[in-house]
Amino acid sequence: MRNTAKITTAVLAAGALTLGLSACGSDKGSAGDKDGPLVVAATPTPQGQILDYVQKNLAKKAGLDLEVREFTDYVTPNTAVQQGEVFANYFQHKPYLDDFNKKNGTDVVPVPKGTVHLEPLGVYSKKVKKLGELKDGATVAVPNDTTNEARALKLLADNGLIELKKGVGYEATPKDVAKNPKNLKFKELEAAQLPRSLSDVDAAVINGNYALEAELSPAKDALVAEKAKGNPYGNFLAVKKGDENDPRVKKLAKLLTSPEVKKFIADKYDGAVVAAF
């Protein structure tokens, strides 16, 4: 969710690679028709792949007629839900959705028990094997977009390297570091550049999808990584307010949080994507 604007880069933390695009129209009739198939907008990776797995392996047995439409931008899936062009979407996390609703006057909401996965940020290094080994004045590269940078700083704070000012929330920057006992220096880079920076810095905080592209395993190579459960950056199924109890939506939410999907995520993504249920 790339770096053309803050509202789009924010969702990169929710973690989606921008590959391919499907048209918003359909010749099956209105996507908002509650008697028709459940039409879900998604970004291709990993959301589209996860939905494809559900469609091919679980939906028919559960009596769910599922249609997936892929988008490469991070605005259309919400506006399409708001306008009834699709019934649901799966591509974003809560901080992004809250910001989107506030800026656009929309009322898209998460589906209860519909949080599926997290693409965890991890700290990687070619120079140390433990965070505690970082020397005084070490340089740490962090993503330069609003949401990912705040996530990166929070990960460092959660692991005792820094302390952040109270109440900084999802927009923290290095200026909001209240205590920095190792006098760490922060190098702000586009998220996609971070894996290539590893040789030039002492450590880097890298998104799960970019780690996977760089053949880094969050499960094996990260010094520390975000935890999935209770993480506000988990990606979820979302609908227009009032549609949360649609039987098809509840059925899909149950399938997306099934043991089969958890195994699919674990087997396919090597820790770059982790189940959040």
Image (tube, rainbow, N blue to C red):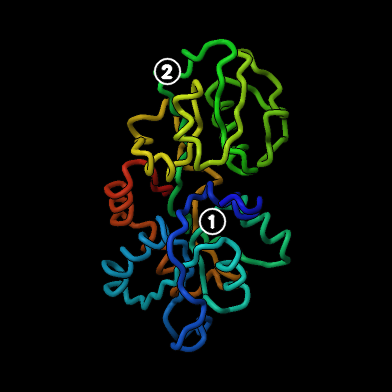
| Depth order, front residue of 59/24 | 24
Residue 8, above or below 239: above
Q: Amino acid at mark 1?
A: Gln
Left or right: residue 11 compared with residue 18: right
- The residue that mark 1 highlights is 92
Count of all numbered marks drawn on residues in the image: 2
Q: Position of residue 128 (x, y in %)?
A: 42, 17
Relative vertical location of residue 49 with respect to residue 167 in this rendering, above or below: below
Q: Mark 1 falls on what kind of element? A: strand
Numbered label attached to residue 127: 2
Q: Residue at x 43, y 60 (%)?
A: 19
Residue 178 location, x and y as percent?
71, 22
Quick one: label 1 or label 2, which is nearer the N terminus?
1
Q: Is residue 17 above or below residue 35?
A: above
The amino acid at mark 2 is Lys
Residue at x 36% of width, y 59% of height: 50
Q: Badge 2: few (under 14), some or many (20 or more) residues near its Cα, within 10 Å?
A: some
Between residues 63 and 105, which one lies in front from this camera angle?
105
